[in-house]
Amino acid sequence: MTNIDRRQFLKNMGLVSGGVLLATSPWFSAFSEQKHSIGSKARIGIIGPGSRGQFLLSFLVQNPKVEIVAICDLYKPSIDAALKMAPKAKTYTDYKKLLEDKNVDAVVIATPLHLHYNMAMDTFDAGKHVFCEKSIAYSMDETLDIYNKYLQSNKVFFVGQQRLFDPRYIHAVEMVHSKKFGEIEGIRAFWHRNNDWRRPIPIDATDKQINWRLYSDCSKGIMTELACHQLQIGTWAMREIPNKVMGHGAITYWKEKREVWDNVSCIYVFDNGVKMNFDSVLSNKFYGLEEQILCNKGTIEPEKSKYYFEEIPPAPAFLQMINDVENAVFGSLPFAGTSWVPETANSNDGHYLLDKKPESDGTSLLLEAFAEAVITGNQPPLIAEEGYYATQLSLLGHQAMAEDRTLIYSDKYKIEYLNHKKQTVF
Ligand SMILES: NC(=O)c1ccc[n+]([C@@H]2O[C@H](COP(=O)([O-])OP(=O)(O)OC[C@H]3O[C@@H](n4cnc5c(N)ncnc54)[C@H](O)[C@@H]3O)[C@@H](O)[C@H]2O)c1
């Protein structure tokens, strides 16, 4: 996406006027008028160009302000695939050697979760900017350490939470913040699939190498891989962090060798009593994935790109008449009160958030913002903090389920939500 395209994108969003966009999504300030000289580039190295890493690379290599200068992976097929996209990059098998490379300004970390901690800490220590895939780290302490390391550095820190740049989500949250739907009364997030979450194992690899998500010392399963995206939407919409969580996790269907749950359910509670539910079942995909933001005057479903007002216009008079007649004939039908509308029916078709289907899920803009931030040294507000809390909450939920008890979110892990330390240009 070039600068011109981006301007068009923002225009299409209808969010550029009156600072509305920056109020709801302050990380867009990465795109405000930049002072860097024409021709300056972000020289990026990537550690772990596997499935996600290659997807990220596919956008990075299209950005004229980015040069992919280094690639590191232990697995040759990943290196080979990355080299096809960035043939001039130097290759490494030891990430510490990549960090010694003076041509590398910034590092994208797209390795399995349990490796993020050392890689992110070492990257800041090497004096380089960090883009770390979600979740940030395997434990809440590690996540806090990385965040503190970032604060002490004069480097930028981005996390792979692409919905922050997804037009559907930006528009949805902007509408929520404008109080168009009244107050948030509940958030229901779910991510259901019907597959075993296994990848086929090539002959030159081990199961753990490929299916690390299913091993409890590498990943916290559904919570760190899926929930962390959706919990971030809840806190972004609420502009607040929940303080309490309870839940249950189990393996109910995929009982072959795996160490992480295939069926989880958590309730996060905000101070005002509003609840955010997260559910995931890997053996029924009927409801798919969504974050439903329930407000007293309406409901928003950003993934579907739709919103619904509570009060729907009355049906045309003749339809009501037919209903009345049918009611008289079939008087025992379970209608609620005197209304002709059955209470459980969802006959509200709602409205679309955007005029047309968005072309991007936000990943390309997120990476473009990262490149801008690397070139200017200017960290956009809240982007690190959104990523931080998304990881913390997914880990807290996992812990509550593992310990089978209600947990309070400890003050120890609370950071200043509006941490604008990094807004100055260094
Ligand atoms: N933001 C998103 O929507 C999204 C989507 C998918 C994955 N992810 C995240 O991306 C990360 C990677 O997931 P994936 O699905 O690409 O995994 P993957 O297994 O496909 O890729 C990981 C890569 O890291 C390499 N690797 C492992 N150990 C290494 C080491 N010590 N040094 C260098 N390279 C090493 C592997 O060989 C592999 O190429 C995870 O954190 C995951 O949560 C994010």
Image: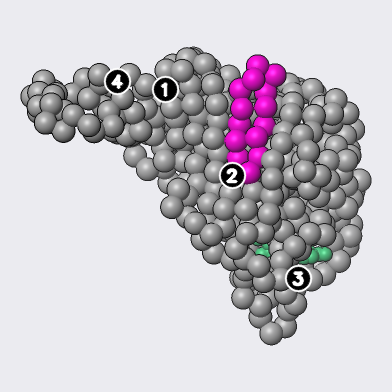
Q: Which residue is more in the foreground, 163 or 194?
A: 194
Q: Earlier in the sequence, mark 3 or mark 2?
A: 3
**View extreme (bottom): residue:** 203
**How far apart, in angstroms, are the residues tagged by discs 1 and 2?**
22 Å
At mark 2, the secondary structure is: strand
**View extreme (front): residue:** 332
**How far apart, in angstroms, are the residues tagged by discs 2 and 4?**
32 Å
Q: Check disc 3 and report the residue beneath it.
A: 208
* Left or right: 293, with 241 as reference point: left
Q: Which residue is more in the foreground, 164 or 240?
A: 240
Extent of the magenta region: 265-279
* Left or right: 50, with 416 as reference point: left
Whether disc 1's CB lies below 8 Å from ligand 1 is answered no
Q: Which residue is more in the foreground, 270 or 208?
A: 270
**How far apart, in angstroms, are the residues tagged by discs 3 and 4?**
57 Å
Whether disc 4's CB lies below 8 Å from ligand 1 is answered no
Kind of residue at badge 4? Gly
At mark 3, the secondary structure is: helix
In this picture, is 55 found above or below 296?
A: below
Residue at (65, 35) in percent of width and height: 267
**How far apart, in angstroms, are the residues tagged by discs 4 and 1?**
22 Å
**How far apart, in angstroms, are the residues tagged by discs 1 and 3?**
45 Å
At mark 1, the secondary structure is: strand
* The label number, if any, that marks residue 298 in the structure image: 1
Tag 1–tag 2 contact (CB < 8 Å):
no
* The label number, if any, that marks residue 279 in the structure image: 2
Q: Check disc 4 and report the residue beneath it.
A: 337
Residue at (74, 29) in percent of width and height: 244
At mark 4, the secondary structure is: loop
Q: Nearer the viewer, mark 4 or mark 1?
A: 4
* Left or right: 196, with 409 as reference point: left
